[in-house]
Image (cartoon, grey):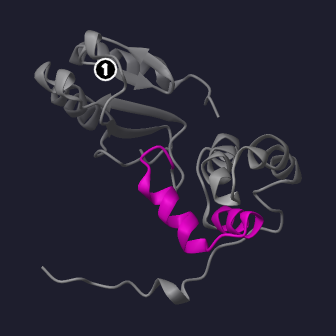
């Protein structure tokens, strides 16, 4: 296997006229988070959370704005955001379905739940439906081992879920408003 470099150094970032990192967000970071840390880098995760909570994902322009605000290299911000599963660097669906793949859920056949989602939604893990309604992910552990197999639909925990229940949850969620 060989390394294949992508020419990202010359990539253009799509920009909008107004910033993603608003003055209100900067004020929150300045007052609530920056005083807690020895360096501004300590506020990087809270800054990423601020953007994601506001927009549902973290656009490239926002990464640059965070880097400038915290006086960090843009590469450090991108490295951090792309390292953690919880950050989204591309738009996700209105609703998130997260199937736990921890050991307990694996023993209880979480794969049947993932397969039910894949078949019903017509997408693979990590993808979003064409209508933008659902994104399907698998997470390492959602902390519900006693109720395996467990899933999150948006931020709602469902335990001991069967494939039939999974299908019903998708139907029930389809017409709900987005939690964003």
x 27%, y 16%: residue: 145
Quadrant of the drawing holding the N terminus: bottom left
x 51%, y 48%: residue: 87
Q: Residue furthest front?
A: 38
Q: Position of residue 136 (x, y in %)?
A: 37, 39
Residue 85 seen in the current view: yes
45 vs 127, left or right, is right
Look at the image and say whether residue 33 sits in the magenta stretch.
no
The foreground one among 13 and 106 is 106
Quadrant of the drawing holding the C terminus: top right
The foreground one among 7 and 113 is 7
The foreground one among 110 and 131 is 110
Question: Residues in magenta?
Answer: 61-87
Quadrant of the rendered structure where residue 56 is?
top right
Give the SS element for disc 1.
Answer: helix
Look at the image and say whether residue 79 sits in the magenta stretch.
yes
Placement of 28 over or under 22, stated as above or below: above
Residue designated by label 1: 167
Residue 160 seen in the current view: no
68 vs 88, left or right, is right
**Magenta highlight: main SS:** helix
99 vs 162, left or right, is right
x 85%, y 44%: residue: 31
Q: Position of residue 149 (x, y in %)?
A: 24, 18
Quadrant of the rendered structure where residue 105 is?
top left
Q: Position of residue 106 (x, y in %)?
A: 15, 27
Placement of 142 over or under 69, stated as above or below: above
């Amino acid at each position: 296997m060989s390394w294949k470099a992508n020419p990202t150094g010359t990539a253009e970032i799509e920009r909008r006229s107004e910033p993603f990192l608003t003055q209100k967000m900067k004020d929150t970071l300045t007052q609530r988070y920056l005083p807690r840390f020895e360096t501004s880098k300590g506020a990087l995760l809270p800054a990423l959370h601020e953007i994601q909570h506001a927009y549902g994902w973290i656009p490239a322009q926002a990464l640059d704005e965070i880097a400038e605000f915290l006086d960090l290299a843009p590469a450090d911000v991108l490295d951090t955001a792309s390292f953690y599963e919880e950050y989204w660097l591309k738009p996700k669906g209105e609703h998130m379905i997260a199937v736990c793949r921890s050991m307990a859920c694996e023993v209880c056949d979480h794969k049947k739940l993932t397969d039910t989602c894949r078949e019903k939604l017509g997408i693979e893990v990590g993808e979003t439906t064409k209508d933008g309604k659902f994104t399907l992910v698998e997470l390492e552990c959602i902390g519900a081992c006693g109720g395996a197999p467990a899933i999150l639909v948006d931020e709602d925990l469902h335990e001991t879920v069967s494939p039939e229940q999974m299908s019903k949850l998708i139907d029930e969620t389809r017409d709900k408003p987005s939690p964003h």
